[in-house]
């Protein structure tokens, strides 16, 4: 292993949280490598919102500008690749990429995000992030007062009904099969005149990801502008699990208020460790991870 492949800190994942951590550590004069494969989860999303100074810009614009700024710090390097394996070493960790390139580091930050599991509904994946959305704070203003669906069941459907009714009263819940809402939840929903449709959904009719209508198994349709949904997800990288990082019941990497995982010398930030999936939050958690990791290092070095 050559010196050029050795770093104080390796950040796996170079989207918003990873770049934010990289900037913080670059400004702290740390020798950092950011490994990224260039496949962010919001790549289909046309515009990013609710991020002060960046509102309305495309995700790519924000990420490109962020990377250009991080590149100004000479101690931060980038590697275009996908990390697939990590092992503990006496002095830290060894990381191997898909192309069998190896790096060693004392500390790790995972900014690897999560991978959404698309339901088996034709057209869903094409609409995801465009007209099928997960967060009203990120996208709700753009579809305010429009005909809007909630594709969910049980507690998630009820929570969305409460929340989204602040943005539009033209709401319909689609449970895609038998409802698992409680009688109490159904009674509350009915007081707000929100229909609950239990028909099975077979497809979503759309144009370039922009929803036109839902198509049901009985061939009937329902016209909508947008749908809120929360698909299942898995960790985008299984390296944290390889190294023994604990996960929460929700499948997120378990971290403390300083973004430290349950494994010494490993931090995590962004969507992989938080249910609040927003660019602004990812950036903030990356700053926290970088600053607290550097602080931990200076305490040892001093």
Image: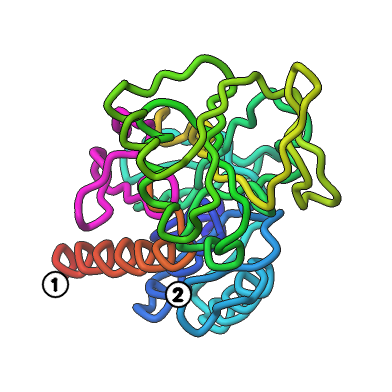
Is residue 233 within the magenta segment? no
SS class of the residue under badge 1?
loop
Q: In front: mark 2 or mark 1?
A: 2
Q: Which mark is residue 23?
A: 2
SS class of the residue under badge 2?
helix
- Residue range (magenta): 245-273
Q: Give the residue drawn at x 68%, y 52%.
A: 225
Question: Within the image, what quadrant is residue 263 found in?
Answer: top left
Is residue 267 within the magenta segment? yes
Q: Give the residue drawn at x 38%, y 78%.
A: 29
Q: Is residue 165 above or below residue 183?
A: below
- The x, y position of residue 75, in whole percent, is 49, 75
- The x, y position of residue 151, in whole percent, is 56, 35
Residue bearing the label numbered 1? 302
Q: Main secondary structure of the magenta part?
A: loop
Q: How is the image coloured?
A: rainbow
Q: Seen in the image, is 206 located left or right of residue 103?
A: right
């Amino acid at each position: 292993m050559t010196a050029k492949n050795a770093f104080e800190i390796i950040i796996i994942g170079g989207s918003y949280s990873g770049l934010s951590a990289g900037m913080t550590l670059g400004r702290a004069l740390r020798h950092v490598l950011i490994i990224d494969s260039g496949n962010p989860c919001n790549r289909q999303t046309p515009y990013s919102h609710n991020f002060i100074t960046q509102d309305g810009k495309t995700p790519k614009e924000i990420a490109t500008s962020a990377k250009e700024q991080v590149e100004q710090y000479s101690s931060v390097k980038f590697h275009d690749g996908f990390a697939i394996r990590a092992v503990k070493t006496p002095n830290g960790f060894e990381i191997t990429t898909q192309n069998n390139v190896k790096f060693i580091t004392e500390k790790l930050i995972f900014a690897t995000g999560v991978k959404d599991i698309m339901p088996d509904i034709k057209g869903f994946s094409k609409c995801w992030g465009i007209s099928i959305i997960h967060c009203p704070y990120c996208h709700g203003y753009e579809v305010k007062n429009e005909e809007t669906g909630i594709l969910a069941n049980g507690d998630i459907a009820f929570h969305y009904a409460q929340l989204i009714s602040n943005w539009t009263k033209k709401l319909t819940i689609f449970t895609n099969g038998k409802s698992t809402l409680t009688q109490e939840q159904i009674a509350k929903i009915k007081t707000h005149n929100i229909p609950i449709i239990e028909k099975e959904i077979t497809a979503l009719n759309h144009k370039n990801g922009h929803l036109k209508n839902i198509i049901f198994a009985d061939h009937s349709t329902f016209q909508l502008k947008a749908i809120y949904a929360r698909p299942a997800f898995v960790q985008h990288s299984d390296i944290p699990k390889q190294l023994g990082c604990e996960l929460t019941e929700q499948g997120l990497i378990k971290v403390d208020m300083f973004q430290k995982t349950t494994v010494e010398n490993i931090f995590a930030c962004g969507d992989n460790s938080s249910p609040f999936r927003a660019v602004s939050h990812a950036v903030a958690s990356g700053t926290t991870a970088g600053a607290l990791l550097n602080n931990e290092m200076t305490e040892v070095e001093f």
